[in-house]
Image (cartoon, rainbow, N blue to C red):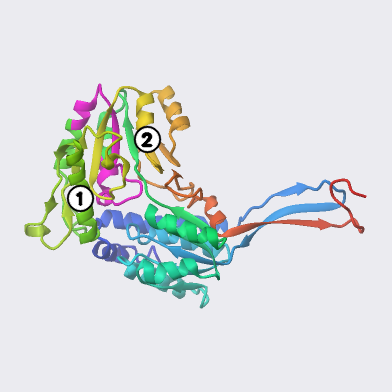
């Protein structure tokens, strides 16, 4: 059904959430891909078999559904992220209470209706809309909900983790990020520039994997900057429903004002504004929350725009003199979701793989672009250690059960007891 209704849902997403039609189609395609992948996990659910220390005794492990799962999802990927949570929860045998973001309830409703149409029994998937205080918080606090899977801000994630800790719930958190693109002198600059532009401004920067920082080697900084500005300044800004649009509106007025506030903070802190930095509100932009794509230079680790997640079409350049400095710059925030390095040097590649404190690391690829068969999640304050997608997605919604079958016909006491 997702495949059959892909275009219909993409148009609805462009209207409700605002991103471009191409990105909307990709959002739904990710849900399709994950449905296929997780359906396969239903035939695996692998445990292990192992020898017992005692004779005539067989041991193994199996997964057991954790129980009622509370799923709280954001607005930026209104089909993909709900499917990342719904499919593994359901295939694990859990029942679900699903609360989508208040900005994108219609797409969530359409998804739930498809589950019902597909034949999911009543009561297995339960749908509730509302703001966090009225719908999310009661879900987190309800004693019958055994696990919470939340994607959103660090501030809200901390509160959920505190409540879950007190109530001994399983809590899986995918929170903020401050992702970094490293560009070394041996990089293919044409490719690196496009990766920086795409990574920073796709979905108007409203991605947890957005390239909000770029650490560029001083030997190529001027050339990289000039090429990046030429690319960014020619971006088509407009409504997501226009097929020519590259950068669409941000989600709502509150978010627009927050982004503009951060741009002002960056200027007051001494970062050099290279392009953008203002709202677009005349003519065709009058009825939307549009911000020109914004690039800063001379951004330092002491600045808030270096440290804090902006979640908008804003990125900053930081000059580095070596790979070691670039890795230090990349790691110099409390977040650690996605990092990327552009280089053809094998030593640079493996040093980056080993030393970058990020849950997702790309070599010669943008910071954005998750694949459903790989675990997705971050280090440090980006989350609490859980991973979504891939086979590891089942860990959110299952308990491990150790099972032993003694066929000796007598009581056998472990640890050598008679």
214 w.r.t. 418: above or below:
above
215 w.r.t. 210: above or below:
above
Given residues 132 and 114, the one toward you in this image is: 132
How busy is the neighbourhood of tag 1: few (under 14 within 10 Å), some, or many (20 plus)?
few
Q: Which residues are magenta?
A: 197-225
- How many marks the image carries: the answer is 2
**Residue 238 locus on image (x, y percent):** 16, 55
Cα–Cα span, label 2 and label 1 = 23 Å
Residue displayed at 59% across by 63% down = 66
In the rendered image, is residue 344 in sight?
no
How busy is the neighbourhood of tag 2: few (under 14 within 10 Å), some, or many (20 plus)?
some
**Residue at the disc numbered 1:** 261
- Which badge, 2 or 1, is on the more N-terminal residue? 1
Q: Secondary structure at mark 2?
A: loop
Residue 332 is marked as: 2
* Residue 219 forms part of the magenta stretch: yes
Q: Is residue 346 left or right of residue 93?
A: left
């Amino acid at each position: 059904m997702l495949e059959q209704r892909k275009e219909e849902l993409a148009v609805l997403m462009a209207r409700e959430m605002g991103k471009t039609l191409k990105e909307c189609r990709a959002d739904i395609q990710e849900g399709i891909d994950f449905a296929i992948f997780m359906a396969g996990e239903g035939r695996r659910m692998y445990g292990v078999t192992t020898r017992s220390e005692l004779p005539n005794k067989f041991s193994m492990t199996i997964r057991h559904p954790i129980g009622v799962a509370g799923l709280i999802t954001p607005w930026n990927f209104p089909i993909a992220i709900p499917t990342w949570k719904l499919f593994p929860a359901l295939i694990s045998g859990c029942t679900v209470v699903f609360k989508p973001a208040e900005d994108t309830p219609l797409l969530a409703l359409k998804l739930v209706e498809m589950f019902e149409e597909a034949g999911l029994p009543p009561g297995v998937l339960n749908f509730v809309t509302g703001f966090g205080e009225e719908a999310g918080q009661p879900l987190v606090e309800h004693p019958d909900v055994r696990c919470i899977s939340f994607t959103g801000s660090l501030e809200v994630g901390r509160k959920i983790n505190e409540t879950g800790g007190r109530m001994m719930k399983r809590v899986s958190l995918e929170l903020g990020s401050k992702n970094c693109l490293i560009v070394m002198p041996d990089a293919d600059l044409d490719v690196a520039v496009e990766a920086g532009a795409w990574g920073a401004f796709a979905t108007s920067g409203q991605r947890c994997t957005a390239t909000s920082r770029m650490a560029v080697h001083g030997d190529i900084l001027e050339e990289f900057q000039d090429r990046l500005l030429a690319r960014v300044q020619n971006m088509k800004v407009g409504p997501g429903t226009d097929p020519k649009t590259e950068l669409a509106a941000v989600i709502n007025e509150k978010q627009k004002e927050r982004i503009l506030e951060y741009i002002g903070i960056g200027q007051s802190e001494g970062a050099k504004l290279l392009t953008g930095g203002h709202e677009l509100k005349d003519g065709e932009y009058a009825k939307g929350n549009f911000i020109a794509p914004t690039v800063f230079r001379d951004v330092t680790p002491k600045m808030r725009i270096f440290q804090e997640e902006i979640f908008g079409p804003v990125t900053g350049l930081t000059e580095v003199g070596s790979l070691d400095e670039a890795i230090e710059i990349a790691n110099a925030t409390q977040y650690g979701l996605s990092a990327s390095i552009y280089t053809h040097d094998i030593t640079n590649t493996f040093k980056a793989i080993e030393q970058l404190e990020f849950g997702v690391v790309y070599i010669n690829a943008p910071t954005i672009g998750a694949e459903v068969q790989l675990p997705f999640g971050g280090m440090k304050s980006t989350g609490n250690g859980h991973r979504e997608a891939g086979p590891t997605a089942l860990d959110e919604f299952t308990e491990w059960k150790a099972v032993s079958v003694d066929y000796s016909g007598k009581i056998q006491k472990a640890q050598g007891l008679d």
